[in-house]
Amino acid sequence: MDRAEMTALQPEDFPHHAPMTSRWTDNDMYGHLNNSVYFQYFDSAINRFLTTEAGTDPMGGEIRNVVAESGCTFLKEAHYPTDFMVGLRVEHVGRTSTIYRLALFSSGATPTLHAVGRWVHVFIDTTDGTPTPIPEATRRALLRISTDEAPQ
């Protein structure tokens, strides 16, 4: 996704929304949200979705999702105090992995796009750490917010 495509994103381009509220400690010495905070918001939005919509247990069970890749394009500074919304969609559902697209918008009458992220999860067997097929309930939840034209 190029920068022009990113900057055109709107909240309605994302079928799932997760509210986030900045904290005083999210600011860095330059007076804006530290870059690592964006990743924390994205991680929280994904895991909240998986927990509430797919019934996964991120801390237990025989299968876990681990981050294989993550990235963020920063478009506009964000500051404390701000209420945000993380837009979440799935761009691909594979056999053992999924690719998410995320966007951080400030909440309000006219949402402002601050960042766009990409996140790859691989589902692993906790006994040996090897990739394992995505559980069916999780797959169904992922497909509900998927833009993948040919989900597997």
Image (cartoon, grey):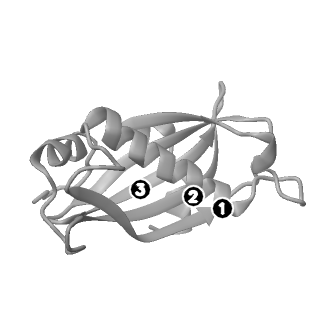
Tell me, yes or no, whether the two marked residues, 2 and 3, touch with CB atoms within 8 Å. Answer: no
Query: Quarter holding the C terminus?
Result: bottom left
Amino acid type for the residue under numbered disc 2: Phe
Query: Quarter holding the N terminus?
Result: bottom left
Nearer the observer, disc 3 or disc 1?
1
Q: Which residue is drawn at 27% across and 43% down?
A: 56
Work out whether residue 28 or residue 3 is closer to the camera in this orientation and state it. Answer: 28
Q: Which residue is drawn at 65% across and 31% down?
A: 110
The image quarter containing residue 100 is bottom left
Report whether 103 appears left or right of 53.
Answer: right
Amino acid type for the residue under numbered disc 1: Ser
Tell me, yes or no, whether the two marked residues, 1 and 2, touch with CB atoms within 8 Å. Answer: yes
Determine which of the numbered discs, if any, sits on residue 36 in the image: 1
Q: Which residue is drawn at 83% across and 57% down?
A: 28
Sequence order check, earlier mark of 2 and 3: 2
Q: Distance between the residues labelled 3 and 1?
A: 17 Å
Nearer the observer, disc 2 or disc 3?
2
Q: Which residue is drawn at 30% across and 49% down?
A: 60
| Element type at mark 2 | helix
Residue 96 is situated, as x and y percent measured from the top left of the image, at 18, 66
Q: Is residue 38 above or below residue 50?
A: below
| Element type at mark 3 | strand
Q: Name the residue under label 3.
A: 101
Q: Name the residue under label 2.
A: 39
Residue 14 is situated, as x and y percent measured from the top left of the image, at 40, 41
Residue 2 is situated, as x and y percent measured from the top left of the image, at 50, 69
Label 1: few (<14), some or many (≥20) within 10 Å? Answer: few
